[in-house]
Image (cartoon, rainbow, N blue to C red):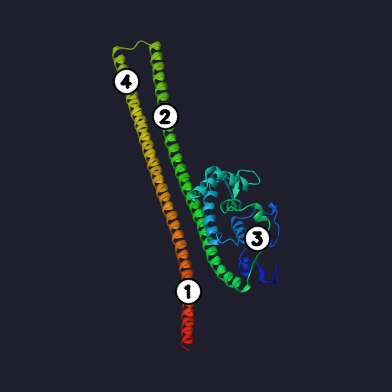
Amino acid sequence: PAPTPTGEGELVSAHGDIEVANVSFRVRALHNRKQIELGDLTNMSVLDQMELFLLRFTEHVDITRSALVQLMQEFDKYEGRSNVIGEIEIDQAMKLLEARDETKTATELWESLKAVDLDRNHFVSYIEFSLCYFNKSWKDLLYKTEVRVVRGASVAANQQGAAEAEALKAMADEMRMKAINDKLRAEEETRARQQSLDNKAQAIAAEKAKILEDAEEAKRKEAEMEEGMKKSKAFFLRQQQMLDNEKKLSPEEEVKQGLAKRKEEKRLKEEKIKADALAEEKRVAAEEEKKVAEAKKQAMEEKERADAEAAKERAAAEAKRIEEEKKAKYEADKAAMEAEEQAKKDAEKAERDARRAKMAERAKMFEGK
């Protein structure tokens, strides 16, 4: 709403025009209403929820952008474990409050969370959680209250707040984009590892199939050789029977026939021994190839497990490093703001002391006269 003059100053937005310009059109439109309906808050991103909450409660000194950004970062961690996008379960919200050293009892926390969960779905959005954490009600959020401040002081405060808000918002955006990139990189690495495992499994399956095919071929050839030997033996038996039936052999012919028969039986026996040796050799070779393939498969699986563990450790180390960088940056920004605030206070105090000293000096001059 446009400012309206009063006797004590002007009616202005507590965040000022500069601050409101930093948020989305939807949040600005909602904030400009005197009353917000619950349906207007559906499908709102966590960042927009934070901006709307900050605008509606900007007059409260304990509700700052840095506090809400930190609360949003912790809320995002629990949101990743929930099945509902943009919300966390009530028991997760309880754990988050306990992690922030909330002084209320478990029963009081549970009742506070149930009070802000108007749709009774046992899930809490960021704006609902913020209401509970800062002890605000839905009425405070939905019905707008305006703050009367002096224009000159408000503009200076708004400019400083806008600069701090812009820096914190940029930090939040940077951390969010880094988290998204880390997640995409981890998913890509997982897909690549899975593809590598699939390719190796296919190669092992093809090699195993080749070994089985070679073994089947050896068995087939062995069976064919045995069948040929049986047929040859049967053929010679029939020939012998035919000769026996035709005439009576002389002793010399019987000796020759016996020698030929023994020679043929010896040849057939040697061929069978060779066939058995060949089959055994192929069987042993197939078993050796199978053992080699299994050893290769086991070695690849162990390597994949080692690579997965190493990747997991690298991801954990990277996450820890990112978290430490976030914490260090936050602490540095906080220390810088506190130092700047202290410097301003020291400068104001020095100026007041100088004015008092000057007034005291003038008073002594008048007393001398």
Q: Disc 4 or disc 1, which is closer to the eye?
A: 1
Looking at the image, which is closer to me, 120 or 152? Answer: 152
Q: Disc 2 or disc 4, which is closer to the eye?
A: 2
How far is mark 3 from mark 1, CA to CA? 40 Å
The residue where tag 1 is placed is 349
SS under mark 2 = helix
The residue where tag 2 is placed is 219
Label number found at residue 293: none
- Name the residue: 46% across, 69% down: 342
Q: Which of marks 1 and 4 precedes in the sequence? A: 4
The crowd level at tag 3 (other Cα within 10 Å; few <14, some 14-19, many 20+) is some
SS under mark 4 = helix
Residue 237 position within the rendered picture, expressed as x and y whole percent measured from the top left: 39, 16
Check if mark 2's residue and mark 4's residue have beta carbons within 8 Å.
Answer: no
Q: Amino acid at mark 1?
A: Lys
Q: Amino acid at mark 2?
A: Lys
